[in-house]
């Protein structure tokens, strides 16, 4: 695994914007960083891919364990959600079944799971499209661990026959950076490529008529992809209506993702698979060790994550999340030119689909920079 | 029929009360200008009962209430839904967490 600096393409901003990446620069520093790239050997890619397969299998087992024993209150999930989660886990309603495993990896040992983001993962456009176009232009002869776009389109094609009609709504909200609109627009493209018809909708515009959800034209919403987390939805005024529409709206991703997207699952995984090579120790109880990372169960983008080494807080990312914490072993991210990369290994339909590299300081947040990669 | 329509059309209104329709709606009224059960128009329009047409966004009167805000004549080019299948839509019940518009996005983990 290597990091190499390179001169960005002269017109890189226009090129990435043309692909849809319109928030490429944040706070005066480029979010898409093509002044450097990572190289991996095929053996390293194989190792990351194998770890992804193994981790996914462990999450399936952990899900079975949690659902069969109804351990939902350990995750802080409201009781009215429990029957919905049980039913969805059992019945497997249509879904992309996608997600991004964030892995600590430096090429010298097995990849370690930092967390699994599978409800509203982002950096999807960069990983699926932008880094591929960069590679084709700069390193046409090299390969890249990336079949994300094709797999997303294929998955929409797979589930289309199970949806009511071919109109899929894509729910999101307006965030300051415009990132959500970009990610949503990309997913709409993948659905359109599969022959579906997509319709964007702000979550604030989703209507409830007493029986079913409707869009701004009062059309019933049969399928709602959401770039909006379950843990927010279920606490909002319309949350409980989700349980009242008798399944009229299919939600993508389904509500069972609430289990996997809650960081408390890291402690369950360590309980079930202690000392697994791809896991860091994790517990909901404060450890005796004086080196660890603490994260709120439901925090996002690194908010409120604290890194403690030898009893000293060496990094802390502020935010507004509170609530119960999970504690995890500290993984020393590799340092390449003072950049610490985290591997984002994607799954679609539960299978490995490619990866992206994000680099930052010790805690990867939403201003971390995406850097492309090639396979040597 | 009217009671079923009221239940279908939202939990924030009285069972026999009026509500605001999102779509153009027609109801049944008697000769005295009061709303009656929709069934009566289905059986015998012209025998003392007739349709009353209310535009989208207007208030649909409850059964027993005097009709107003609409007309006994439908507006040309407007498709009216029977009250039983008409509905009123509330919005704004999702999307408020995270500081709302311009704040933190819903995506990103």
Image (spheres, rainbow, N blue to C red):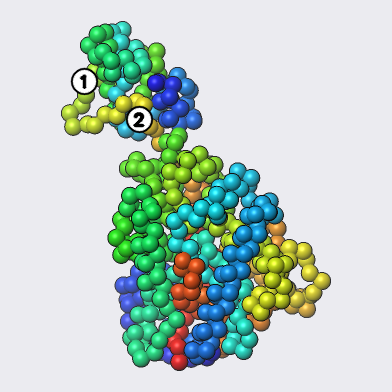
The part of the image, by quadrant, that contains residue A94 is: bottom left
The answer to whether marks 2 and 1 sit on the same chain is: yes
Most extreme residue toward the left is: B76
**Residue A366 visible in the current orientation:** yes
Report the residue at 70% width, 62% height from top.
Answer: A325
The image quadrant where one finds the C terminus of chain A is: bottom left
Q: Which mark is residue A287?
A: none
- The spot of residue B43 in percent (x, y) is 28, 15
Dot 1: chain letter: B
The nearer-to-camera label among 2 and 1 is: 2
Q: Position of residue B97 (x, y in %)?
A: 54, 51
Of callouts 2 and 1, the N-terminal one = 1
Q: Which residue matches tag 1?
A: B73
The residue that disc 2 covers is B85
On screen, residue B101 versus residue B85, left or right, reads right
Q: Is residue A297 visible?
A: no
Question: Considering depth in this image, is A68 or B74 the residue closer to the camera?
Answer: A68
Kindly identify the residue that appears in the image at 39 percent across and 32 percent down: B88
The image shows residue A72, relative to residue A185, as above or below, that is above
Q: Is residue A358 above or below residue A238?
A: below
């Amino acid at each position: 695994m290597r990091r190499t600096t390179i001169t960005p393409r002269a017109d890189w901003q226009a090129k990435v914007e043309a692909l849809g990446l319109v928030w490429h620069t944040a706070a005066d520093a480029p979010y898409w960083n093509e002044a450097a790239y990572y190289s991996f050997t095929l053996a390293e890619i194989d190792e990351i891919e194998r770890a992804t397969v193994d981790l996914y299998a462990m999450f399936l087992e952990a899900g079975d364990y949690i659902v069969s024993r109804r351990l939902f209150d350990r995750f802080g999930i409201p009781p009215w959600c429990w029957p919905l989660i049980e039913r969805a886990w059992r019945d497997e309603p249509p879904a992309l079944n996608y997600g991004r495993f964030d892995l600590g990896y430096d090429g010298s040992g097995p990849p370690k799971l930092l967390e699994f983001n599978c409800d509203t993962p982002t950096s999807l456009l960069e990983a699926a499209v932008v880094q591929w176009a960069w590679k084709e232009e700069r390193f046409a002869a090299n390969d890249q661990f990336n079949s994300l776009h094709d797999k997303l389109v294929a998955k929409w094609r797979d589930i289309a026959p199970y949806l009511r009609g071919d109109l899929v709504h894509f729910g999101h909200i307006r965030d300051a950076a415009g990132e959500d609109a970009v990610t949503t627009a990309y997913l709409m493209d993948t659905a359109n490529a599969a022959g579906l018809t997509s319709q964007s909708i702000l979550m604030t515009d989703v209507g409830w008529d007493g029986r079913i959800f409707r869009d701004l034209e009062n059309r019933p919403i049969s399928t709602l992809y959401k770039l909006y987390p379950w843990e927010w939805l279920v606490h909002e005024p319309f949350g409980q209506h989700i349980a009242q529409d008798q399944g009229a709206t299919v939600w993508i991703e389904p509500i069972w993702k609430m289990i996997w997207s809650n960081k408390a699952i890291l402690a369950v995984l360590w309980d079930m698979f202690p000392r697994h090579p791809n896991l860091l120790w994790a517990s909901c109880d404060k450890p005796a060790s004086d080196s660890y990372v603490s994260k709120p169960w439901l925090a996002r983008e690194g908010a409120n994550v604290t890194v403690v080494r030898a009893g000293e807080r060496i990094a802390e990312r502020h935010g507004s999340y509170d609530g119960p914490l999970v504690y995890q072993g500290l993984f020393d991210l590799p340092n390449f030119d003072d950049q610490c990369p985290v591997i984002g290994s994607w799954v679609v339909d539960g299978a490995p689909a490619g990866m992206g590299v994000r680099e930052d300081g010790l805690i990867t947040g939403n201003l971390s920079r995406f850097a492309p990669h090639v396979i040597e | 029929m009217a009671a079923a329509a009221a239940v279908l059309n939202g939990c924030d209104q009285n069972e026999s009360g009026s509500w605001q329709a999102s779509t153009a709606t027609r109801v049944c009224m008697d000769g005295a200008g009061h709303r009656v059960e929709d069934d009566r128009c289905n059986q015998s329009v012209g025998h003392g009962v007739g349709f009353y047409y209310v535009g989208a966004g207007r208030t649909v009167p409850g059964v027993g209430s005097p009709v107003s805000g609409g007309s006994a004549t439908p507006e040309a080019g407007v498709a009216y839904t029977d009250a039983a299948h008409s509905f009123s839509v509330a919005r704004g019940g999702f999307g408020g967490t995270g500081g709302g518009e311009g704040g933190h996005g819903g995506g990103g983990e």
